Structure formats: structure tokens, C-alpha cells
């Protein structure tokens, strides 16, 4: 029987005043009872608009119907037909702006909790599955994938299912890309990512870590000397942006990229860490920016004992971060100083951050992005006492690949230029995800990896 409640089932979570002191996962996941109740809200409508909103085309009504039948493994298999990372997507995808945005139930109430149901199914599978996926027979073709983030893992998984011999080259010492170095444990446990990587290995995917393509080996060498017939570049966007204001070279100024990598991947906050980070206990930290990465940096800082400000030049309504992440940050005690913009970082005699000079802003006419342009209010400068500043202004693609690969066309922002099939200006070389678009979402990167895998398959089949 359909559940016609206008509200989706709430996600159980840790108490804000408990979770802001630990790195355990905030959202606890649906119980079976909650999942069944939420699945009953799906009307299985005729045109399935939710599927059209999913970049990897998960057959959403089909997997939700399996949940109502208590066939949770069947539901997982439906998702896994098109998504290689369901446990990841169920946690970090912005469903509210994709599949759930088009849910018919959202017209007169809240949409079906598609992401929460995907997480439930993936977690059920991980807890109960005992057999690894069977490794397909090799078709004799070799493909190299550069980068083990969401686009690379998706491309590798889709090709491996078709029998390709796939090798993933990862620059860091652990596979997962932004999923392990960028997204904090409290949003995406690293054991979940490792489980997904292990699933790909079971399909025959080889993962080579500590391989900086462009330094250890070039794309040309992969193709000419190691006989890879096609290459997918999913190297992400790891080059941080700064404001270029006075004081950005002071001790205690970090890019969010560096800060989160130290926290998430290197566990730099531990006393015995080989790559320690400054102690934030009892300190004041300013995070500059308003996206999901800024929320991650702010919430990590809070967990390390700091009083945290998010400084953003527009208002709360214009924050680009997911509403859920902003809501969690507010609950955890993060202070939002919106309608302000830094103009200078001030240091003490030892070269450490002492304060940050900000200026108040007001919103003018819309800019090219459609958002109202922030304008400085003359004479409104003030000093914000802080001990550390984390710049979270976005990232651009690392220039290493473009600088070491012959004939690879790049756009003005450093992204690799591809056609509608994901093909670059080099024959046999494809690219996708943040390496093409600049920093974007996990699911969009996965969609690009899926497109490239399809194109590579067609290219090598016709060869």
C-alpha cells in the first residue's frame, strides 16, 4: 500500500554536540522499517522523471520496488547495473538537485528519499554479501586509467565488466582520489571507499599507487612502451585557488585541499603523525568560501577543537553548499559570517596568522552566473581575530598531464578539452570528471567516467 505522507523519513544521526567532537559518521542510515516505509512513498510513475535526473541513469523506481518486496540484494543489483559506487553515491550525491529534484512526490511535499534508500541498499549488500563478483573473461584489450577518483573508478569498473584488462594509476598511496583525501570520514567512511575499490579488484582491475603520471611515466609511454590501447584521464582538479591578498604566505594559512588531505588521508591531527598539522584546540579558524569543501574544512576544524567562522561574500541563501551540509554545520556550532570578504591576513612578529581584515558586502545586480554580484561597502573594514585561515575558493585541474602529453588541447581554465564522447584531441585518449570541468560533484564525475567507458569500448571494438 502506498505511503502518501508528504514528508520523507528523517535520517537518524548523531547528536550535534557529540558528533562535533568525533570523526564518526554523522548520518546513521535508515533502519529496515524506515526503508520500507520510505520506499512505499514511491508511486512508480509512468515516465520515471527521477531516472532522467541521474547522471548514471540508475533505474530508480525498479530498485525501490525491490525494496518494497524486501529483495534488498535484488535492489542492489539493479543499482549496480549502472553505478559502480552505490554506497558512495548514497552518502555524498546531491540528490536534491538531481534525481530527487524531478520526483513527482516533490510537487506537493517532499520527494522520495532516493539517496537514503540507495545507501540502505548498498549498506545491506556490504553487510550480507559473501561472494565476490565473478571476473569476466578477458577480451585481450588493455586500457589505462589515470586517477582513482569517482570518474576513474567508474570507467575502470564499466570496462572491467566487459572483459577489458584495466590498470588504474593513482598518484597517492591509497586508491579513492577525492573520496579518500577530500571528503571527511564523518561524511564518507574510508572503509566504504575501500570496499568499493576491492569490488573492482575482484573484477580484475589492477590498481598501481604512488604512480604520478607525467613524472614516473607519461601518457605517451603508457601507449607506446606499455601497449595500452586507450587511456582515460580522470586526474581530478587538485590545484587550489587563492585570493592573492596580502598575508596568504603566513604560517597558518592553508588551502582547503591541503588541509583536508592532511586530515583525511594523513591523519595529521594525531600526535604520532609523520605529517603533523598545527594544533587547533582552543584556536580560532576562518574558512573562506561557501561550498561543500568549505563546509568540510569548517566541520573538521570544529572537531579538532577550534572555534570556526565561515566567511562568505554572499548571504546564507546564496551558499553553494548542499543545504544538508550547511544545516549540519550550523547545528555543530559553526559561525557563519556571511556578506563579508577578506582583504588582508595579518601576522604577528613570528610570521603566524594573528587576524584577518574583512570588508562588509552588499548584493548588486546579477553577474554572469546569475547570482547577484557582491559589492564592497566602503569604510566597513574590521579585523577578525583568528589563528588560522583555510582558503576554500575552488580548484582547477593539475597542469602536470597537459604539460607532459603531446597534442592535448586545454581550455583557458586548464581543463582538458573533450568532444561529446569524452575523446580528447589525442586519438585513444579520453578524459572526464574534474580534469575536464574543474571541481564538480562525485556523480557528475561518475557520469563522465561511464560515458568514456562506453566510447572506449566502441573505439576498441571497431579497431
Image (tube, grey):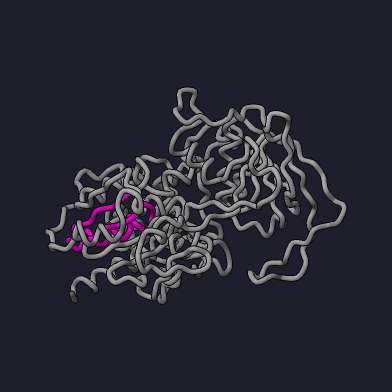
95 versus 20 height, above or below: below
The foreground one among 5 and 320 is 320
Residue drawn at (57%, 64%) of the image: 109
The foreground one among 419 and 214 is 214
- Residue 148: in magenta span: yes
Tell me: 140 left or right of 449.
Answer: left
Q: Residue 150 placed where, x, y %?
A: 38, 55
The foreground one among 5 and 173 is 173
Residue drawn at (31%, 52%) of the image: 72
Q: Residue 366 placed where, x, y %?
A: 71, 70
- Quadrant placement of the N terminus: bottom left
- Residue 24: in magenta span: no
426 versus 32 height, above or below: below
The foreground one among 354 and 446 is 354
Q: Does the image show residue 36?
A: no
Q: Which region shows up in magenta? A: 143-170
Residue drawn at (75%, 51%) of the image: 340
Find residue 114 and report its image quarter. bottom left
- Quadrant placement of the C terminus: bottom left
Tell me: 299 left or right of 182.
Answer: right
Residue drawn at (49%, 69%) of the image: 411
Tell me: 6 left or right of 342.
Answer: left
Q: Residue 267 placed where, x, y %?
A: 46, 32
Q: Residue 95 placed where, x, y %?
A: 49, 60
Q: Does the image show residue 119?
A: yes
Amino acid at each position: 500500500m502506498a505511503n502518501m505522507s508528504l514528508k520523507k523519513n528523517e535520517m537518524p544521526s548523531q547528536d550535534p554536540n557529540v558528533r562535533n567532537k568525533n570523526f564518526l559518521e554523522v548520518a546513521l542510515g535508515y533502519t529496515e522499517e524506515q526503508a520500507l516505509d520510505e520506499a512505499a512513498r514511491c508511486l512508480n510513475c509512468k515516465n520515471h522523471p527521477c531516472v532522467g535526473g541521474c547522471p548514471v541513469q540508475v533505474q530508480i523506481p525498479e530498485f525501490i520496488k525491490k525494496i518494497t518486496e524486501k529483495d534488498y540484494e535484488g535492489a542492489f543489483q539493479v543499482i549496480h547495473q549502472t553505478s559502480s559506487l552505490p554506497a558512495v553515491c548514497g552518502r555524498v550525491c546531491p540528490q536534491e538537485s538531481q534525481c530527487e529534484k524531478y520526483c513527482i512526490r516533490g510537487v506537493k511535499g517532499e520527494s522520495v528519499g532516493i539517496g537514503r534508500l540507495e545507501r540502505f541498499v548498498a549498506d545491506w549488500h556490504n553487510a550480507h554479501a559473501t561472494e565476490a563478483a565473478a571476473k569476466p573473461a578477458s577480451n585481450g584489450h588493455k586500457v589505462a586509467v589515470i586517477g582513482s577518483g569517482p570518474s576513474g573508478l567508474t570507467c575502470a569498473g564499466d570496462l572491467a565488466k566487459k572483459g577489458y584488462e584495466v590498470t588504474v594509476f593513482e598518484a597517492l598511496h591509497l586508491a579513492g582520489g577525492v573520496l579518500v583525501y577530500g571528503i571527511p570520514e564523518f561524511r564518507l567512511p574510508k572503509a566504504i571507499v575501500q570496499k568499493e575499490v576491492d569490488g573492482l579488484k575482484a573484477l580484475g582491475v589492477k590498481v598501481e599507487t604512488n604512480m604520478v603520471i607525467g613524472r614516473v611515466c607519461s601518457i605517451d609511454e603508457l601507449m607506446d612502451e606499455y601497449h595500452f590501447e586507450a587511456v582515460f584521464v580522470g586526474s581530478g582538479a587538485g590545484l587550489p585557488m587563492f585570493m592573492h591578498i596580502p598575508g596568504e604566505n603566513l604560517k597558518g594559512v592553508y588551502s582547503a585541499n591541503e588541509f583536508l588531505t592532511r586530515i583525511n588521508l594523513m591523519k595529521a591531527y594525531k600526535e604520532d603523525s609523520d605529517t603533523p598539522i598545527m594544533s587547533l584546540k582552543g584556536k580560532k579558524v576562518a574558512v573562506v568560501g561557501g561550498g561543500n569543501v568549505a563546509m568540510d574544512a569548517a566541520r573538521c576544524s570544529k572537531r579538532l577543537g577550534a572555534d570556526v567562522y565561515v566567511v562568505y561574500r554572499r548571504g546564507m541563501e546564496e551558499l553553494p553548499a548542499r543545504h544538508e551540509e550547511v544545516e549540519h554545520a550550523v547545528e555543530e556550532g559553526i559561525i557563519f559570517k556571511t556578506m563579508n570578504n577578506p582583504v588582508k591576513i595579518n601576522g604577528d612578529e613570528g610570521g603566524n596568522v594573528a587576524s584577518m581584515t574583512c570588508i562588509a558586502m552588499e548584493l548588486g545586480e546579477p553577474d554572469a552566473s546569475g547570482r547577484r554580484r557582491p559589492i564592497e561597502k566602503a569604510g566597513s573594514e574590521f579585523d577578525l581575530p583568528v589563528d588560522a585561515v583555510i582558503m576554500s575558493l575552488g580548484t582547477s585541474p593539475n597542469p602536470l598531464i597537459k604539460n607532459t602529453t603531446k597534442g592535448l588541447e586545454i581550455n583557458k581554465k586548464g581543463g582538458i578539452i573533450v568532444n561529446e564522447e569524452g575523446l580528447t584531441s589525442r586519438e585513444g585518449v579520453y578524459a572526464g570528471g574534474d580534469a575536464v570541468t574543474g571541481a564538480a560533484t562525485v556523480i557528475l564525475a561518475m557520469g563522465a567516467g561511464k560515458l568514456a567507458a562506453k566510447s572506449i569500448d566502441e573505439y576498441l571494438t571497431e579497431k
